[in-house]
Amino acid sequence: MKGLVLAGGKGLNMQPLSKDFPKVLLRVAGKPVIDYVLEGLISTGIDDLIVVVSDEQVEEHIIRKWGMYASVIYQANEGLEAAMLSASDYFKNHKFFFLAYGDIIAPRDFYKLVLNTYVNAGEHPVLSTVPVVDVESYGIAIVDGNIIADVSHEPSKLIKKSSYVLAGAYILPAELFNYLESDFTLPDALSSIVKKEKAFVAHWTGYWVDIGYPWDIIAANCYVLGDLKRSIISSKAQIASTAVIEGPVIIEENAVVDHNAVIKGPVYIGRGAFIGMNAFIRKYTSVEERAVVGAFSEIKRSSLQVESSAGSYSLIVDSVLGFRAVIEPRVTVLSALSEEKRILRELPLQGIIKKKRKLGVFMGPESRVKAGSVIQPFTLIDARSAFP
């Protein structure tokens, strides 16, 4: 069976993180988002993948790392339908194919469940679903036992009938392309298929994150790092004798952890990253490749993307610093949201004394926060801009 992975598009809802930077190359605990999808598919035994992209950086990454398994094509126009039609010639001689969205974070078993369901169902369409509380920002599936009765990408139509959302991994008949060529939208084509023939549900109950909004990076880090059972520390990492490491951590080669730094896992420290003297790295933080945390800074439940930096004496919480973003010294990020602020896909409540909704700052590539700033909760800073 061939696989089709959709990894194009501009990721508008992911801005400012995705401003002039492909969202599928954003890192989660050391790996680009797209790698979680490709690893999952390849783990099922599928080694013939077509990846649809719209950015040269994604093409270069796929060819460099996954070239023996995957071929890259560019989508001709915007939208899911255009992305799929760009690849239609590769699948028309196949009865079924495996379709996967390139922005899903889930364990490999998620993809194995989809394929096993297909095998057990005896060559019928299979759509994966996950249960969520707030279905508003997802496509929805109406499930009747182990059968998919209907789907919709307009939650207002079906929101009262289902708490199951489409999970972005499907095994579908190649006739789907005929619908798309007849100007069906992908949701309408899926709806027609599940009504025409019996389509089975692969119901996933493990962790799953659709990387659609900047704070989804935080949620994905929490799940992936939360799965760590032991520490993996490279022999080529430089860790000071006075540094304190507690709980499971991953520390990659050439990372430097300076004197009296404290790391409380689960935490990821990437290749060539630097953790300054007396810095405090708290749970569910990823400091990606060549990122820097200055001396006496505290980082909690945040992601420092590749080559980003947090200056000394700073407090960074519930935040994502985009590619090469810079926070200068003595910056404080506040994250407790007001009760009036409404956010799609909110993260779990936090706090020991009182549970609160928390989101900090989300910085676009090569943006900068000036020294001494205090950043209010849920602040978005555009790419290559300065704050304040």
Image: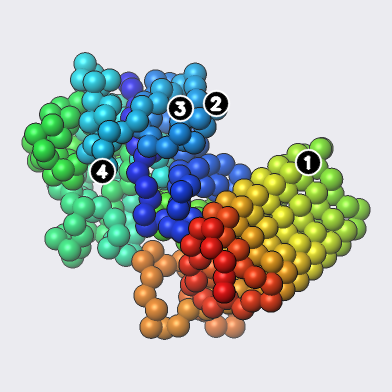
- Report whether residue 339 is seen: yes
| Amino acid type, label 4 | Gly
Residue highlighted by disc 2:
64
Q: Position of residue 47 (x, y in %)?
A: 43, 21
| Of the image marks 2 and 3, the number of the one nearer the N terminus | 3
Residue highlighted by disc 4:
79
Q: Residue at x 23, y 25 (%)?
A: 88
- The CA distance from mark 3 to mark 4 is 25 Å
| Of the image marks 4 and 1, the number of the one nearer the N terminus | 4
Q: Residue at x 76, y 52 (%)?
A: 274
Q: Secondary structure at mark 4?
A: loop
Which quadrant does the N terminus fall into? top left
- The CA distance from mark 3 to mark 1 is 29 Å
| Amino acid type, label 3 | Ile
Label 3 near label 2: C-beta < 8 Å? Answer: no
Q: Nearer the viewer, mark 3 or mark 4?
A: 4
| Amino acid type, label 1 | Asn
Q: Residue at x 52, y 32 (%)?
A: 61
Residue highlighted by disc 1:
254
Q: Residues within 10 Å of mark 2 (few under 14, many from 20)?
A: few
Q: Secondary structure at mark 3?
A: helix
Vertically, is 285 above or below 167?
A: below
| Of the image marks 3 and 4, the number of the one nearer the N terminus | 3
- The CA distance from mark 2 to mark 4 is 26 Å
